[in-house]
Image (spheres, rainbow, N blue to C red):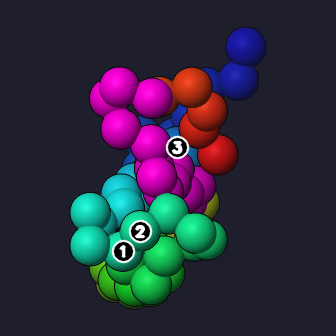
Amino acid sequence: MQSKNKNQIGITALYCRLSRDDGTESESNSIGNQKKLLSQKAKEMGLTDTKYYVDDGYTGTNFAGVR
């Protein structure tokens, strides 16, 4: 088993959620803006191993698929 250096951080999850005002036709402007802001902040904090989790059009009542 490989041990991590105490200064190493695993993957950083960046979560984006659809605004009710954007609709659900395609990936919304809101999601695109959130990705941009989260990416910038992660970079400022030195977090380079990031993964986006996007909730674009799903609610707690239709959470059948996650991208």
**Camera-side residue: 20 or 3?**
20
Q: Name the residue located 44 percent from the left edge and 43 percent from the top edge.
A: 58
Q: Name the residue located 58 percent from the left edge and 55 percent from the top edge.
A: 51
- Report the magenta residues as a range: 50-62
| Residue 53 x/y as whole percent | 51, 50
Instruction: From the image, state whether disc 1 or disc 3 is nearer to you.
Output: 1
Q: Is residue 2 left or right of residue 14?
A: right
Q: Name the residue located 36 percent from the left edge and 62 percent from the top edge.
A: 18
The residue that disc 2 covers is 23
Q: Residue 22's mark?
A: 1
Q: Amino acid at mark 2?
A: Gly
Above or below — where is 15 with respect to 61?
A: below
Q: Name the residue located 61 percent from the left edge and 71 percent from the top edge.
A: 26
| Residue 31 x/y as whole percent | 44, 73
Q: Are marks 2 and 1 in contact (CB under 8 Å)?
A: yes
Magenta span contains residue 40: no
Q: Amino acid at mark 3?
A: Gly
Mark 2 neighbour class, 10 Å CA radius: few under 14, some 14 to 19, many 20 or more: few
